[in-house]
């Protein structure tokens, strides 16, 4: 069974500094997607970044980038130049590439609460 | 503007009441989902739909039911709410590119 593990329940970063959130996953599949979602307090969950497993190049979205290590089954999120608005719960998620029943659905980690200090 | 809407945002009800949580999306997505999330915990899929008249149970067992009569609408119903149903319920939809779009959630409290 696929699992997603976020080993850091809480993280803290100084404004303008860089922080890395870790995520590991377990799967026997070779084709899959990985995601990082952000959920600000009492607000809508939004997609931060997405990575296709067949792509070796790490995904980047402005200040957000990932370090995808397929062999190690690791998918960390790096936030550069942290801003106060980055404070939120961050969820790592996995989805197998082939749709079909529950195997096509997202599996989430437990989340990491990120605090940004001014 | 295309979006996904959930109502109500907060709901406090007594045990035994029947409730329906509404979810609508204006993006024309075929796939829609309901997730349950307890504070500080991961999301668990409780229902999903791949199109009109298609509904399936998710990985987490739930006493709720869903319907998908129209593409844009995916309501979730609890026939008799109990305190154990207290949780946050998140609705989501996705297109072929796999990106999930989430609603703002409904925080349900059953007394």
Image (cartoon, coloured by chain):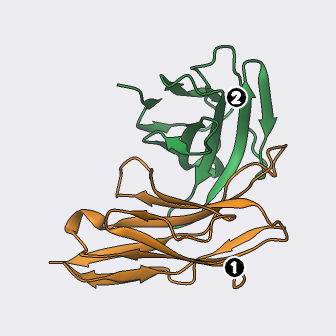
Badge 1 crowding class, 10 Å Cα cut-off, few under 14, some 14 to 19, many 20 or more, is some
What is the chain identity of the residue bearing mark 1?
A: A
Q: Are marks 2 and 1 on the same chain?
A: no
Q: Position of residue B46 (x, y in %)?
A: 71, 45
Q: Which quarter of the rendering shows the N terminus of chain B?
A: top left
Residue A76 visible from this viewpoint: yes
Residue A73, labelled with which disc? 1
The image quadrant of residue B43 is bottom right
What is the chain identity of the residue bearing mark 2?
A: B
Q: Does residue B37 lie above or below B48 as drawn?
A: below
Q: Judge left or right: residue A44 versus residue B51.
A: left
Q: Which element carries disc 1, helix, strand or loop?
A: loop
- Point 57% across, 49% down: residue: B86
In front: label 2 or label 1: 1
Residue A103 vs residue B20, the one in the foreground: A103
Please say if the residues under marks 2 and 1 sit with CB atoms less than 8 Å apart.
Answer: no
What chain is colored orange?
A
Q: Position of residue A11 (x, y in %)?
A: 39, 82
Q: Does residue A61 lie above or below B83 as drawn?
A: below
Residue B111 visible from this viewpoint: no
What chain is colored green?
B
The image quadrant of residue B29 is top right
Residue B79, labelled with which disc? 2
Q: Which element carries disc 2, helix, strand or loop?
A: loop
Gap in angstroms between the C-alphas marked 2 and 1: 42 Å
């Amino acid at each position: 069974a696929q699992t997603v593990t976020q080993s850091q329940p809480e993280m803290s970063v100084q404004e303008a500094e860089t922080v890395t959130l870790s995520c590991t996953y377990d799967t026997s599949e070779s084709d899959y997607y990985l995601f990082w979602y952000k959920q600000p307090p009492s607000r809508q969950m939004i997609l931060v970044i997405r990575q296709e497993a067949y792509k070796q190049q790490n995904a980047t979205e402005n200040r957000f980038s990932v370090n995808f290590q397929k062999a190690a089954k690791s998918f960390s999120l790096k936030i550069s130049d942290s801003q106060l608005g980055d404070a939120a719960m961050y969820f790592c998620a996995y989805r197998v590439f082939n749709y079909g029943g529950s195997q096509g659905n997202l599996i989430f980690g437990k989340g990491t609460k990120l605090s940004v200090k001014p | 503007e295309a979006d996904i809407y959930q109502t109500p945002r907060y709901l406090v009800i007594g045990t035994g009441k029947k409730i329906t949580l509404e979810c609508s999306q204006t993006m024309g997505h075929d796939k829609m989902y309901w997730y349950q999330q307890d504070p500080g915990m991961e999301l668990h899929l409780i229902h999903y739909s791949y199109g009109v008249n298609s509904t399936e149970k998710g990985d987490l067992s739930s006493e709720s039911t869903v319907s998908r009569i129209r593409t844009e609408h995916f309501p979730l119903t609890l026939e008799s709410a109990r305190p154990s149903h207290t949780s946050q319920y998140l609705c989501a939809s996705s297109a072929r590119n796999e990106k999930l779009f989430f609603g703002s959630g409904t925080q349900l409290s059953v007394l």
